[in-house]
Every structure is written in C-alpha cells, then in structure tokens.
Image: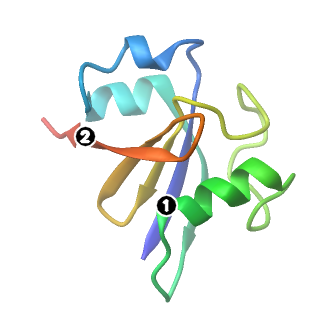
C-alpha cells in the first residue's frame, strides 16, 4: 500500500475545493508531494495524520525539503492507496480527486 502526503502552497485551500472534490490538475499545481512510502501492512489515515502532527521527521526523510510549512496543517492531503483525505483540525475527511 502506497501512502503519499501533499502539503498545500495556498493559504486557504478550503476555498479552492468545492464540496469534497478536487481535480487532478489542481492537486498537481496547488499541492507539493512531500512524502511517499510503501507499507506492507494496512495503515489508516488517522495514524499517518498523528505521525505528521506530532513528530518532527515522521517516517524518516521527506521527499521535498523546501516546502510551505513544516508540519501537517488543515488543507493538506493524505493519499492512502487510491483514497484521498483532506486534513482537518481533528483528523481527516475523504475527498474525491477527479481525473480528466
């Protein structure tokens, strides 16, 4: 299972997302892929969110050193397998990424 974490470059990403959908193009332009890892066992989004919220260097070395912020924040996206989740203040909610 591949897990990816995207950090948002915009100050207010909630305004850019209509409902629970975001386009694949917006994901590539507004967000930076900062971390990617493959796990052999099942991992839920809550565990990934907690790791990025509490630890300075969660799960080892990040992909991108230069990024807009240092810790996971509301509006960032966690991808677990084929599911995408937008981070809130307390956890994450599932969103849909529209591929065109």
Give the residue displayed 31% in from the left and 57% down from the top. Answer: 83
Which corner quadrant of the image does residue 93 belong to?
A: top left
- At horizontal 54% and vertical 60% (from top left) the residue drawn is 46
At which x and y percent is residue 75? 51, 29
Q: Residues within 10 Å of mark 1 (few under 14, many from 20)?
A: many
Quarter holding residue 9: top right
Rendering quarter of residue 76: top right
Q: Which mark is residue 97?
A: 2
Mark 2 or mark 1: name the one nearer the start of the chain. 1
- Helix, strand or loop at label 1? It is helix
Contact (Cβ within 8 Å) of mark 2 with mark 1:
no
In-front residue for pair 96/60: 96
Please tell me whether residue 12 is drawn above or below residue 84 in the rendered image: above
Q: Is residue 36 in view from this perspective?
A: no
Determine crowd level at label 2: few under 14, some 14-19, many 20+ residues with C-alpha closer than 10 A.
Answer: some
Q: Is residue 51 above or below residue 26?
A: below
Q: In the visual, does 21 lie left or right of 27?
A: left
Q: Which residue is mark 1?
A: 45
The one nearer the camera, 100 or 42, is 42
Residue 26 % position (x, y) = 34, 25
Question: SS of the residue at dot 2?
Answer: strand
Residue 30 lies, in percent from the top left, at 47, 23
The residue shown at (49%, 88%) is 41
Quadrant containing the N terminus in the rendered view:
bottom left
| Side (left or right) of 78 relative to 21 | right
- The structure's colour scheme is rainbow
> Which quadrant, please, contains the C terminus?
top left
Residue 60 in sight: yes
Q: Nearer the viewer, residue 89 or 38?
A: 89
Left or right of 29? Residue 11 is right
Considering every residue shown, the one lying at the far left of the view is 100
């Amino acid at each position: 299972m591949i897990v990816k974490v995207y950090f948002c470059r915009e100050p207010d990403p909630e305004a850019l997302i209509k409902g629970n959908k975001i386009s694949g193009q917006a994901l590539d332009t507004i967000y930076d892929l900062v971390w990617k890892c493959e796990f052999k066992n099942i991992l839920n989004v809550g565990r990934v969110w907690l790791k990025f919220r509490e630890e300075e260097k969660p799960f080892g070395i990040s992909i991108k050193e230069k990024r807009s912020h240092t810790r996971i924040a509301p509006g960032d996206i966690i991808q677990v397998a084929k599911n995408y989740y937008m981070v809130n203040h307390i956890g994450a909610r599932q969103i849909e990424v529209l591929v065109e």
